[in-house]
Image (cartoon, rainbow, N blue to C red):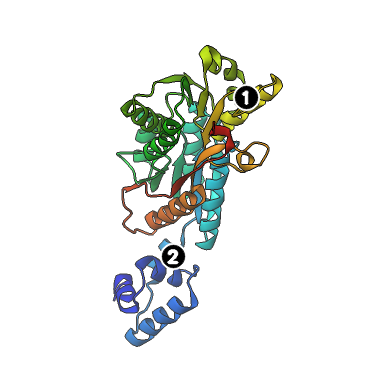
Amino acid sequence: MTINDIARLAGVSKSTVSRYLTGGSVSKKSAEKIARVIESTGYVLNASASKLRSQRSRLVGVLVDGIDARAVTRILRGINDRLHELDYLPFIVIDNHDEDHKLAGMQALVRQGVDAIIFGTAQLTDEHARFMLGADVPIIVLGQRSDAFPFAKVDDYAGGRLMAEHVIEQKPKHLVYLGFPGYDRAGLERWHGFVDACGSAGVGVEYLECGYEREAGYHLAEQALANGTDFIVGASDTICLGVLRYLGEHGMSAPKDVRLAGFGNYEEGSLPMVSLTSVGFDYLALGRDVARKAVDLIEGEDVPHESVDYPMEIHVRNSSLA
C-alpha cells in the first residue's frame, strides 16, 4: 500500500494524502476519507520516509525586482495568501534590478533551504538559468516565458492588442508608446501586441523607451508631447501617472491636451480626478496560481509547463476619449 493507493481509494490527490500524513493542512472532509482508507487497509506509515518528507522548511523563495509597482504588490499578496492556506510561507528577496544582487539572491534562497523558488524578475538570463538548473530546488518562472522551467504569466501580447483596438477607435494623429526597458520580456510582448495591431490598421506608433517609475514618465513627457502628439500609451499606469503630473505642472490635462492610457488598472488611475483608461490583469489570481504551482512542484505533482490564461479587460475612462 502506497500513498498513491491511498489517494486513489480516498478520491483525493497524492499531495493531500502527503499533507495529512505529515501534519499539514487538509480539509475535514478529505481527512475523514483518508482516515477511513488507512483504517480499512491497515496502512502503517514508514517512520523514516515520514521523517524525510517532513524535513521541509515550508518556505517558498520569491525573487522580485522591487515592490514599488502595484502589479508586484498584488502578485505578492496572492502568493502570500495562497501559501498561507497551504501551510507555507514566502521568503521574499528583492534585487532592485541589479544582476549581481539577483544571482546572490538566488544563492541565498538555496542556502536558506527553501522548498521551491518563484523567479519573478523581469530578466531571465542564461546565467540565471544555468544556476537554477544546477540547484536541487523546484523552480517556477513568473511573468515571462521559459523553455527550461514551468512558467505562469498573463498574455501580454493579447493585452497589447486589446489596448490597440481601443486606441485605433480614437483615430489618433500622432501616437506615442512609452515602453519598458528592452530586457523586460513581458514589456516587449505587450509592445509587440500593440504595434502589430496598430500596424494592421495602418496606424503609426512612435516608441520611446521609459523606466518603470513614475518619475521616468514625468521626465519623458516633454519629449513624448513633441511633434503634435495627441495620444500617449504608457506600458504601465505608473508611467502615465508621471505624465499626468507633468501635464498638471504645465497647465495641461488629459484628454483636453493629449489622450492617455496605460496598463495595470491601478486604484489611483480609477480615481475621478485621474480617470485613466487602462488594461487590467488579474494579478492577484496570477499570484495565487503560481503559489499553488510551486507547492505542487514541491510535492511531486505534474505541473503544466505553460500557463497564460488569466482574465484581462480594458477599463475605458475619460483620459483616452476625445
Q: Give the left or right position of residue 189, taking residue 320 as reference.
A: left
Q: Give the left or right position of residue 89, taking residue 184 as reference.
A: right
- Tell me which corner region of the image, top left, top right, bottom left or bottom right, holds residue 214: top right
Question: Residue at (31%, 57%) from the top-left corner?
Answer: 302
Q: How many neighbours does mark 1 have within 10 angstroms: few (below 14), some (14-19), or many (20 or more)?
A: some
Q: Amino acid at mark 1?
A: Glu
Which numbered disc covers residue 51?
2
Label 1 residue SS: helix
- Tell me which corner region of the image, top left, top right, bottom left or bottom right, holds residue 81: bottom right
Question: Residue at (56%, 46%) from the top-left corner?
Answer: 74
**Residue under label 1:** 215
Distance CA(mark 2)–CA(mark 1): 52 Å
Q: State whether residue 265 is above or below residue 58.
A: above
Badge count: 2
Q: Give the left or right position of residue 141, taking residue 243 as reference.
A: left
Q: State whether residue 129 is above or below residue 292.
A: above
Q: Amino acid at mark 2?
A: Lys
Which of pointers 2 and 1 lies earlier in the amino acid sequence? 2
Which residue is situated farthest in the bottom direction here? 40
The foreground one among 271 and 191 is: 271
The foreground one among 302 and 107 is: 302
Label 2 residue SS: helix
User: Which quarter of the image is occupied by the C terminus?
Assistant: top right
Of labels 2 and 1, the one closer to you: 1
Where residue 174 appears, as percent x and y from the top left, is: 47, 19
Which numbered disc covers residue 14?
none
Report if residue 161 is visible in the image: yes
Where residue 198 appears, as percent x and y from the top left, is: 37, 28
Question: Residue at (38%, 48%) from the top-left corner?
Answer: 138
Q: How many neighbours does mark 2 have within 10 angstroms: few (below 14), some (14-19), or many (20 or more)?
A: few
